[in-house]
Image: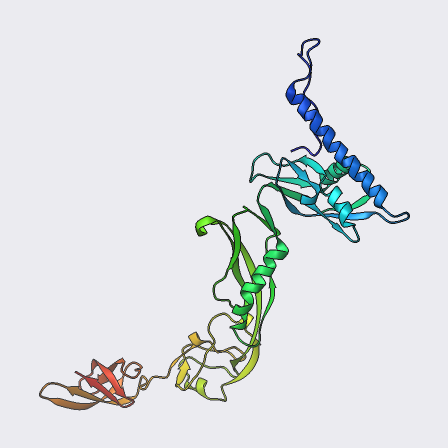
Amino acid sequence: MGLVPPPPPATGGRRRGEGPTAKEVAMKRRAITIFAVAVLAAAWLLAALPAGAGLWRIAVREAATAAGERVLLSEIAEPSGEFPADAWAVLGATPLWYAPEAVGRVSVIPSAKVMEGLRYYLRDAPVEYALPSQLTVRRGGRVVSGQELRAMAVETLTPKVAALGAEAKLLSVSAPEHLFIDDNASVGVEAAELQPGRTTFRYVVTGPGARILQQAPAEAVVEHFGRVPVAIKNILPKDGAAMEQIAYVYERRNLAGIKGRVFEPGDGQWRARKGVGTGQVLMADDMEPMPLIVRGDQVKLIYQGRAVRLTMLAEAMTDGAPGGKITVKNSKFAKEITGLVKDKTTVVVQ
């Protein structure tokens, strides 16, 4: 894609006295029209500019769409400052270089080339330009800016962050610099349950029939403070002291740095499944329910048959939870038997 009108076709090979073709005439007329518009626009601006006033300013966007064969100034730029509306209506209609040939095609133009094209087409217009590092132009459709995308994300994610708790806050969201979409498409934000810290979501472009046309990953940063149990001494595996108040205290911590589910004692009795060091947060995976019967306890073993009931003493070989299976060993017969825990001193074999 050129930024200036292409030269007329070469005349080599044309017979002497033969005139230009209809296509060449049309191209020449179109070029003359474009230059005439640019000259008239520049003259209008020069006449409208107050004496002694500074140059008017035009800011070129990073991404834009062109509806027709040529890019219009108003499609890629917008006035800034005190730019008169009537003057912009004239200048903004100035045709510039050719748009990409096919609908949906994209062209990327470096900043220097954009400036070259603007100076060529706008001639002596009394304006100065603010340019991005490059301009991306798409033929047809529309562009959704990064600012719009971030606003969408904030609107969608804010209620989800509020559901985490009173001390949860959405710190930031990322977004693509822009998204090109078709005229009949729409953009939405999809996010699963948010977690403290960095969490991912995505922008989804859908077309007719809710068909997914494009997806763009993004990231949000969520801050969330809460009270968590923190060990104030080393807790050893199988140590029931983990449930003693002298073993842990509640502290306010940023949950973003805590991976997994925090331990919640509730009304049950618990012990450590594995060791927890001083200053560490107690996690749910670190703890397990305190068994009714602990390995080594002396229990009453009851054998309950249809016509007979036997009772004897035994030693617990494994830990046993209420209603759970446990292995015990009768001291007299030195035989291991599996039974069900009835209470903290009784095991039943059926």
Residue 94 position in % (x across, y down): 72, 39
Quadrant in which the C terminus is drawn: bottom left
Q: Is residue 234 above or below residue 60?
A: below
- Answer yes or no: is residue 149 visible: yes
- The residue located at (42%, 74%) in the rendering is 285
Q: Quadrant of residue 72?
A: top right
- The residue located at (40%, 82%) in the rendering is 271
Toward the front, the furthest residue is 86
Q: Quadrant of residue 65?
A: top right
- The residue located at (64%, 46%) in the rendering is 63
Task: Tell me: 322 left or right of 305.
Answer: right
Q: Nearer the viewer, residue 62 or 313?
A: 62
- The residue located at (44%, 86%) in the rendering is 243
Q: Is residue 292 above or below residue 89?
A: below
Residue 196 position in % (x across, y down): 54, 69
- Answer yes or no: is residue 174 visible: no
Toward the left, the furthest residue is 307
Residue 91 position in % (x across, y down): 75, 42
Task: Tell me: 266 left or right of 88.
Answer: left
Residue 22 position in % (x across, y down): 65, 20
Count of numbered circles on the image = 0
Toward the top, the furthest residue is 16
How is the model colour-coded? rainbow
Q: Nearer the viewer, residue 28 or 288?
A: 28
Task: Tell me: 293 left or right of 265.
Answer: left
Task: Tell me: 55 left or right of 177.
Answer: right
Q: Is residue 86 above or below residue 330?
A: above
Toward the right, the furthest residue is 52
Quadrant in which the N terminus is drawn: top right
Q: Nearer the viewer, residue 117 or 192?
A: 117
